[in-house]
């Protein structure tokens, strides 16, 4: 259900249930979390690319499995805390950039997974559908946190309450995605972006992710203090020292993630 490939420092994690639009079963969610942990822990991985196979990025929760749990009286079967929350926390806190290649529909938790990534490249015909309200549920997988930081609280409320599909072009206008490209180019473009990040200062990227998340919920003085702490840490890295030397010698720096 998951394909994992490591090339040029980029771990490509592909949801591979194309016949079911990569909808998320308990088995797939467990496999996805395992793959993301593998990427996070592998020092050879310096960026991650998340995508789906076939015509969809991810259609969200597998409703057949979900309906079976409801009929059996198991409700959500603990999947939000057991699966979705750890996956989103890992994506957002991973000390490496994560790029989503949104090749098609991203609905419900599938859209939430894309929002949790650091950058998103979408195919021209891709759509984001916050489908939770349509089945009487509240947004999960971090959508209430990530979406309003991408588009603002008012627009996020509109998208989450109405559940209307967000076309790729409009998503670009709102800042939900980084780039929109033809469908045949989406994986190539996203991989090129991920390779660019994999060749960059990995520790500085990790610190930037941490700084952004912290600043979103803290005061300016607190954010300034964390910036100072993180800057001291980055200043002590080999990448900073070597990049400074390269700058003085009018050379292009070569980052090694150390």
Image (spheres, rainbow, N blue to C red):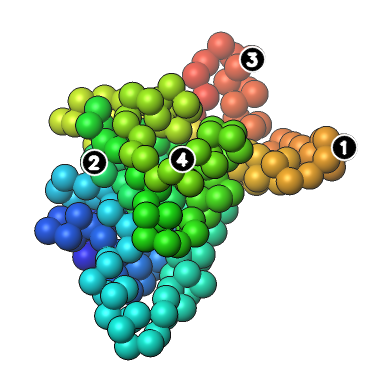
Question: Does residue 114 appear in this view?
Answer: no
- Name the residue carrying label 4: 159
For residue 21, side relative to residue 220 (left or right):
left
Q: Can you tell which mark lies on residue 221?
A: 1
Q: Check contact, mark 1 vs mark 4: CB within 8 A.
A: no
Q: Marks 1 and 4, Cα distance to the nearest angstrom?
A: 33 Å
Which residue reaches farthest top? 250
Element class at badge 4: helix
First in residue order: circle 2 vs circle 4: 2
- Name the residue carrying label 3: 248
First in residue order: circle 1 vs circle 3: 1
Residue 112's place in the image compared with 227, above or below, is below
Q: Check contact, mark 2 vs mark 4: CB within 8 A.
A: no
Looking at the rendered image, the disc whose residue lies closer to the viewer, 1 or 3, is 1
Looking at the rendered image, the disc whose residue lies closer to the viewer, 1 or 4, is 4
Element class at badge 1: helix
Question: Does residue 137 appear in this view?
Answer: yes
Element class at badge 2: loop
- Name the residue carrying label 2: 104
Element class at badge 3: helix
In which quadrant will I find the C terminus?
A: top right
Q: Marks 1 and 2, Cα distance to the nearest angstrom?
A: 42 Å
Q: Marks 2 and 3, Cα distance to the nearest angstrom?
A: 45 Å
Q: Nearer the viewer, residue 136 or 225?
A: 136
């Amino acid at each position: 259900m998951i394909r994992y490939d490591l090339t040029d420092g980029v771990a490509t994690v592909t949801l591979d249930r194309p016949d079911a639009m990569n909808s998320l079963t308990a088995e797939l969610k467990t496999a996805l979390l395992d793959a993301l942990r593998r990427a996070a822990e592998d020092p050879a991985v310096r960026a991650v690319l998340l995508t789906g196979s076939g015509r969809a990025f991810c259609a969200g929760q597998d409703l057949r499995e979900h309906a079976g749990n409801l009929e059996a009286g198991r409700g959500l079967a603990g999947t939000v805390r057991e699966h979705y929350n750890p996956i989103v926390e890992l994506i957002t806190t991973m000390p490496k950039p994560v790029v989503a290649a949104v090749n098609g529909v991203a609905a419900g938790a599938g859209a939430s997974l894309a929002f949790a990534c650091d950058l998103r490249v979408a195919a021209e015909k891709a759509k984001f559908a916050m489908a939770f309200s349509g089945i009487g549920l509240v947004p999960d997988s971090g959508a209430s946190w990530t979406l309003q930081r991408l588009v603002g609280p008012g627009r996020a409320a509109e998208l989450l309450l109405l559940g209307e599909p967000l076309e790729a072009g409009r998503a670009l206008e709102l800042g939900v995605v980084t780039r929109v490209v033809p469908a045949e180019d989406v994986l190539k473009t996203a991989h090129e972006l991920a390779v660019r990040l994999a060749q960059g200062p990995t520790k500085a990227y990790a610190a930037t992710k941490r700084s952004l998340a912290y600043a979103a919920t803290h005061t300016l003085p607190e954010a300034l203090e964390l910036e100072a702490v993180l800057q001291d840490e980055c200043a002590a890295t080999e990448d900073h020292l070597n990049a400074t030397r390269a700058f003085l010698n009018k050379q292009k720096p070569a980052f090694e993630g150390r």
